[in-house]
Amino acid sequence: MAAATCYFLWGLVPLYWRQLTEINPVELVAHRQVWSLTLLVGIVALQRGFTAVFKALNSPQAVAVNGLSALLLTANWLCYVWGVNSGYVIETSLGYFLVPLSNVAAGRFILHEHLRRAQIIAIALAAVGVGVMIVQHGHPPWIALAIVGTWGGYSLMRKRSPLPAVTGLTVETLLLIPFAIAFLLWQNHTGAGALGRVDLRTHLLVLSSGVITAVPLLLFAYGARRIRLSTLGLLQYVAPTVQLIIGIWVYHEPFTSARLLSFGFIWAALVLYTADNLWFQRRPTAA
């Protein structure tokens, strides 16, 4: 229930960001950094994990790895917020549908992992789906590909980092927080900042960005430790599915037959990829 709720909340997030379309996406991401850190510090305090955080900050290697992952995560947030607030909810959902397959491709070409035949076919089907979309629009789905690239890069960096989820996210946020605060102060100085210049409702929404970030992550951390990886893999499709539904039925974004064909190839790839994973994980240990 915790993991399913986490992914469902991530799917609903476009409804939150669309209430803030008048605010600069960079400022929204900066607020997300600041208010997320406020909650993360409280969580780390409850877990008595400050020693691990300070140790990581004193390690040049940990700072380098987590600094790069922080940049990639921030870029992913920025692409997502800009895409949602610019009317591309369906395309952002496409990006997160492609993420599992992009991770498999990265494992093959960057980490030199062996791919099973079904995984190769799944990647090929997804590539055809993206190709159909390129033919339809005359250009690649840049928002979706940017989300895939930044999240895939972030996943690789997190794989190389020995830090647990909460500690790692805290370190990443701490490394970028000076830039986030400096940007917010500059926005306030130039008169472009939101705080102090918007209504009470918008103030509350902006200040809630930390909760929007931290609560699903806590649910994810709780659920991921208690259920099978295969179950977690199936649940990850809840978020982009909810986003797709919101894009079509709430914001009435066009979903043409050509776009349906493109998504059809990608969904077929995900079905094949998931079925292969389930079969492989249930093989006898001796095999």
Image (cartoon, rainbow, N blue to C red):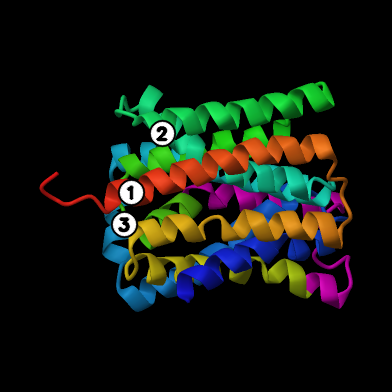
- Label 3 vs label 1: CA separation? 42 Å
- Nearer the camera: disc 3 or disc 1: 1
Kindly report the secondary structure that dominates the magenta region of the rendered protein.
helix
Label disc, if present, on residue 44 of the rendered structure? none
> Where on the picture, by quarter, is residue 209?
bottom right
Q: Residues within 10 Å of mark 2 (few under 14, many from 20)?
A: some
Depth check: give the residue in front, 61 or 75.
75
- Label 2 vs label 3: CA separation? 44 Å
Q: Is residue 152 magenta?
A: no
| Amino acid carrying mark 3 in the image | Phe
Side of 218 relative to 92 (left or right): left
Quadrant, the C terminus: top left
CB atoms of marks 2 and 3 within 8 Å: no
| Amino acid carrying mark 1 in the image | Trp
Which sits earlier in the primary sequence, circle 2 or circle 3? 3
Residue 14 against residue 132 in the figure, above or below: below
Task: Return the residue at label 2.
Answer: 118
Side of 112 relative to 18 (left or right): left
Q: Residues within 10 Å of mark 1 (few under 14, many from 20)?
A: few
Residue 162: image location, x then y, percent: 27, 48
Range shown magenta:
175-203
Residue 43: image location, x then y, percent: 42, 73
Q: Is residue 135 visible?
A: yes
Residue 102: image location, x then y, percent: 50, 35
User: What residue is rendered at 67% in x and 40% in y?
Assistant: 264
- Nearer the camera: disc 2 or disc 3: 2
| Amino acid carrying mark 2 in the image | Ala
Which element type, helix, strand or loop, lies under badge 1? helix
- Label 2 vs label 1: CA separation? 11 Å
Q: Is residue 176 magenta?
A: yes
